Image: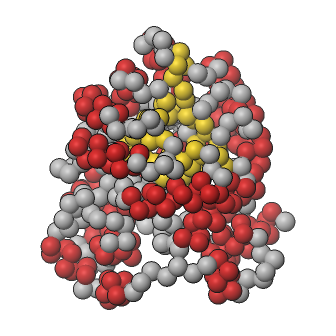
Amino acid sequence: MTTVQFVDTTLRDGNQSLWDATGLTTEAILAVAKQMDAVGFKAVDFISSIHMGVAVRYHKENPWEKTKLVSRAMPHTPLSFGTTGRRFIGFKRCPDSILALVYQCMAANGIRRVWLIDAAHEMEVIRKNARMAKAAGIEDFMTALSYTISPVHTDQYYAIKTREITACPDVNTIYLKDQGGLLTPDRITTLIPSIQKHLNGRSLEIHSHCTTGLAPQVYSDAVRLGVNVVHTAIPPLADGTSQPSVFRVIEDVRTLGHEPAVSESLLPPISKKLYALAEKENRPVGTPQEYNPSYYEHQVPGGMVSTLKRQLSEAGMESRLPEVLEEIVRVRRDLGFPIMVTPLSQFVGTQATMNVVSGERYKMVPDGIIEYVVGYFGEPPAPIDEEVSAKISKLPKAKKLREQHFPQPSVGELKREMGLPGSTSDEEFLLRYAMKGREVDDMLAATA
């Protein structure tokens, strides 16, 4: 009998997938934090740059204080922070000094675990971020193998990437991240063994979404194959486009003859509080999904689907979502099959939306796509369409980016450039660097 550990995703990915990352305030999290701490989760997926921006912009809350308060309320459970390793809040590329300071401030405010998603699985980015995180005092550095379907992303591709990543001494954990909910039981029978052969002593975790309805079965089969850490969420922030319900997976693990390493009896009161919050704020409740083959075409992550719907609705064009999803398939093929994960999924979605709204493909090109084409996000998995590449490469911004060397100013230089007083804390500096000054001013005024 194997013991299966659980990583809880309710507060971060469940919230992002079902409530557009806006649903959980500090007060709401603290209302369940002590109970969650007693469950026995291996870790709690807590915050990312997106959630930090949401805290400032929508809730007028200081995300650093939020992190500190929750980490104090959950002393027995490591909280995790997620990053792409290239940016901090928003989509602009950051110098190394900013990334290093982010890790230092995360560790200082109670974060013990970091997960990195680099859509290109670029080793220079992975090694650099792992080294900075460890230097800051992060205990567990996780790197994602982001799953996708394309002619390029074969079992051999993931085996090679696993071997390269586990050669990095600062990487502690690998996790198979299925942000689109695309994994199938058939696929993992060959994919997981190909990864396991190259783990080099590292732990392997699995993280999927219920978008296509297959994630619970995928988890069961992954456990059969020897994966003993699974990522789940607590209802009502489970199922739907979120992770499988912790209750369902506990039952499946026991049926397979294994022991779930959590105190199941402590979970219903947490779930009850979250259901009450959903009812109070008129939030959607995650429900089991039926199999939906359309996701295997556009591969849009669950959290991004809700964001696309909201953005189109705000523009009075919600009815055009099917057109945008169809265009996403074409744009992704044009760009050499980038993995649909942050930030590339947002870039592809934005480009597809612009193409549909303007009525002309690539008439308008967002900065993220230009940066991708000129190589800011690593080598594309497959060659970019020649006509599209030529069109984008002729743009003035593309020419400028190709010619310039990305600057690497120090924190001190950036503070002086921004005109900040020397007494400005590192945490406030990072928020002001990444966000509009007015947003940070409003947040500080609200929390004074």
Q: Residue furthest right?
A: 448
Q: In the displayed structure, would residue 336 be above or below residue 306?
A: below
Q: Position of residue 217 (x, y in %)?
A: 36, 25
Q: Nearer the viewer, residue 317 or 408?
A: 408
Identify the image quadrant of residue 256.
Answer: top left
Q: Is residue 172 something that shows in the picture? A: yes
Q: Determine the residue positioned at 64% across, 66% down.
A: 101
Q: Determine the residue positioned at 48% across, 65% down.
A: 86
Left or right side of 243 for 98:
right
Left or right side of 345 for 171:
right
Q: Position of residue 104 (x, y in %)?
A: 67, 60
Q: Which coloring applies here?
A: secondary structure
Q: Position of residue 329 (x, y in %)?
A: 24, 56
Q: In the displayed structure, would residue 145 be above or below residue 99?
A: above
Q: Nearer the viewer, residue 424 or 436?
A: 424
Q: In the displayed structure, would residue 306 be above or below residue 285?
A: below
* Quadrant including the C terminus: bottom right
Q: Determine the residue positioned at 73% across, 74% down.
A: 441
Left or right side of 260 for 324:
left
Identify the image quadrant of residue 381.
Answer: bottom left
Q: Is residue 90 something that shows in the picture? A: no
Q: Position of residue 361 (x, y in %)?
A: 23, 72
Q: How many marks?
A: 0
Left or right side of 331 for 261:
right
